[in-house]
Image: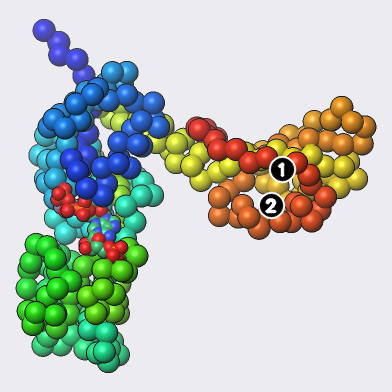
Amino acid sequence: MISKMVLKIAIQKAGRLYDDSVKLLKDCGIDLKNGVNKLKTEADNFPLEVYFLRDDDIPQYVEDAVADIGIVGENVLLEKNKQVQTVEKLGFGKCRLSIAVGRKEIYEGVSYLQGKKIATSYPVLVQQFLAENKVNAEIHEISGSVEIAPGIGLADAIVDLVSSGSTLFMNGLKEVETVLKSEAVLIRNSELSEQKQQLLEKLLFRIRAVRKARNNKYILLNAPNESLSEIISLLPGMKSPTVLPLAEAGWSSVHSVLNENEFWEIIEKLKAAGAQGILVVPIEKMIV
Ligand code: PRT
Ligand code: ZN
């Protein structure tokens, strides 16, 4: 009997990457069967099987081909150092692995750490960082609540993940050095069969379309014809903007696509150039 070919993806079972990982699959048009509380579920309309695991275990499972691909933070990927390949950055789960010390400490560079005790859940990355900077320090590996270590006298400094910085602040610490910038990435086993690679390509095509759409907005506006050339020069568009005549003589409707990053600045300029009735709508998928 020939078993049905499916691509197996490992995602975090619960935690900070769970919602965005599931949403990404959903936005790719992949419907997961109910009962996500299980270890495993299947997609109804794509040959995909989803495994729900602890993030720390995902690189190992992908290396061992228990899962073909996985979604994991770069911080975990680099700490675990498994033989897997990174396929794509996914733009969520952004954070940094940073060194923090007591707020009142005078920190003038990495030499501060010489001979000190550092608490972290990332001993491999910290050791690498110390070696690169030719600093000797004692690493204390702890698995959680790293931020309390200096306060209880366990360490002089910590290396932990930071996003808003409020955890450090609340524990009387200040961030002094970034060891690594991280976001969620799609990883793959290095020896996928031809068929699985094709499925991965198909999924990747969708992921890229979804991510591109998230970073762009569709814009529609009305403009008096005499302002058209200035307005068009402000709009990049996928090729060039679409211009359609309005029922009212002397006016046109202009359609284009704008990148999220330059969005507000361009809108202001468009208004100043005479654009009216500006509508901005989200794009669901974008294939260029
Ligand atoms: O159970 P499992 O092992 O799967 O989950 P976990 O508890 O190990 O991981 P989880 O869910 O906390 O984080 C999963 C991934 O999210 C991490 O590996 C990072 O890639 C990413 N991520 C993004 C973060 C943060 N931002 C983050 N802020 N992971 C953890 N934090 C923690 C940090 O450790 C600190 O305690 O949040 C606190 C700091 O946050 P701020 O906002 O106060 O600075
Ligand atoms: Zn974890």
Q: Where in the figure is residue 223, as x and y percent of width and height?
A: 82, 42
Q: Does 202 appear above or below 157? A: above
Residue 210 tag number: none
For image coordinates 67% across by 46% down, the residue present is 236
Q: Where in the figure is residue 87, as x and y percent of width and height?
A: 31, 43
Marks 1/2: CA–CA distance = 8 Å
Q: Residue 127, located in which quarter of the rendered image?
A: bottom left
Q: Would you name the residue on which mark 2 appears? A: 267
Decide if residue 136 is in sight here.
no
Decide if residue 267 is in sight here.
yes
Going from N to C along the chain, the mark reached first, 1 or 2, is 2
Q: Nearer the viewer, residue 182 or 133?
A: 182
Few, some or many residues within 10 Å of mark 1 (<14, 14–19, 20+): some
For image coordinates 81% across by 53% down, the residue present is 273
Q: Callout 1, which amino acid? A: Ile
Q: Callout 2, which amino acid? A: Ile
Q: Would you name the residue on which mark 1 appears? A: 278
Label 1: which secondary element: strand
Q: Where in the figure is residue 194, as x and y percent of width and height?
A: 25, 26
Residue with the most extreme front position = 170
Q: Is residue 277 left or right of residue 31?
A: right
Few, some or many residues within 10 Å of mark 2 (<14, 14–19, 20+): some
For image coordinates 24% across by 90% down, the residue present is 105
